[in-house]
Structures are given as structure tokens and as C-alpha cells.
Amino acid sequence: MCRALKVLCAAGDPVRLAELKGLAASTSWEVVGGALSLEDLLRQITERDPDVVVFHPDLAGDVEVPALQIKPTVRIVSSGLAEGGDSGVRRDALRAAILGLRGPGGPVVR
């Protein structure tokens, strides 16, 4: 049995988190959880074991260093969403960053 790539999103407020999760949604992977603070993000990395973390730049604190300390293989993607930007371009760029990864593939080992 193969499993889907897991993507965890994080942003500093609920509206931006909902937007980010919508932009990251795809039938090619699973969006798991959603964090509104750095502490919540780090907890969810431990609990949900994502392959990719996508965060909005408004999330307070350094995301990359502590996330990689918890899971060294996690891919960190900053959404780079700016006020008034083109959502179509953002969606394409965000999905391309996620799709640039190889899926976890292979059988699930228990």
C-alpha cells in the first residue's frame, strides 16, 4: 500500500490559513491539519509527520530550523503570499513547489 504525500499548512491568522489550505489543496496529496502559531506547527509536525510544510510569512518566528530539528526530511515551503497578489500565480507557484518533490512512494512498512 502506498500513501499520499502529506502537506501541513501554517499561517498567523485563520483567514490566511484557510486561504493557504485552499491554495495547497490537490487530489495529488493530502492537506493535514493547520497551525496558527509556531508552537502549534511544531506540535503538528511531531503528531502528523508531514512530508511538506507550507507556511505564510506572517507566522511569527523562525519556522525552518525548529521544523528540521523535529523532522530533518521535511520540505519547507514559504508561500510568499503578498497582499493584493495574483492568486492564480500564487497557486501555480505553490503547487509547483510541492510537486517538485518525489512522493514518499513504496509500501508502508509496519
Image: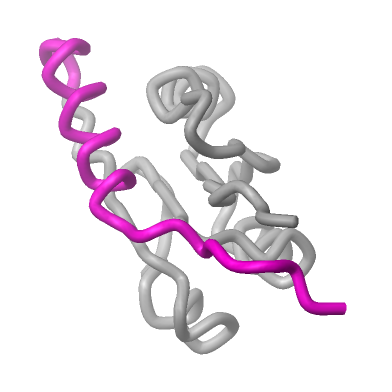
Residue 38 vertical placement versus 59 (above, below): below
Frontmost residue, 102 versus 89? 102
Residue closest to the eye, 84 or 75: 75
Q: What range of the chain is rendered magenta?
A: 83-110
Report the side of 8 relative to 84 (left or right): right
User: Residue 83 placed where, x, y %?
Assistant: 19, 18
Question: Who's the residue at 47% across and 25% down the image?
Answer: 26
Quadrant containing the N terminus in the rendered view: bottom right
Front one among 6 and 84: 6
Quadrant for residue 71, please give it.
Answer: bottom right
Considering only vertical position in the picture, is 61 above or below 94? below
Residue at horizontal 73 percent and vertical 59 percent from the top: 48
**Residue 12 percent coordinates (x, y):** 48, 39
Image quadrant containing the C terminus: bottom right
Residue 19 colored magenta? no
User: Residue at the location (51% across, 88% down)?
Assistant: 69
Residue 28 percent coordinates (x, y): 48, 33
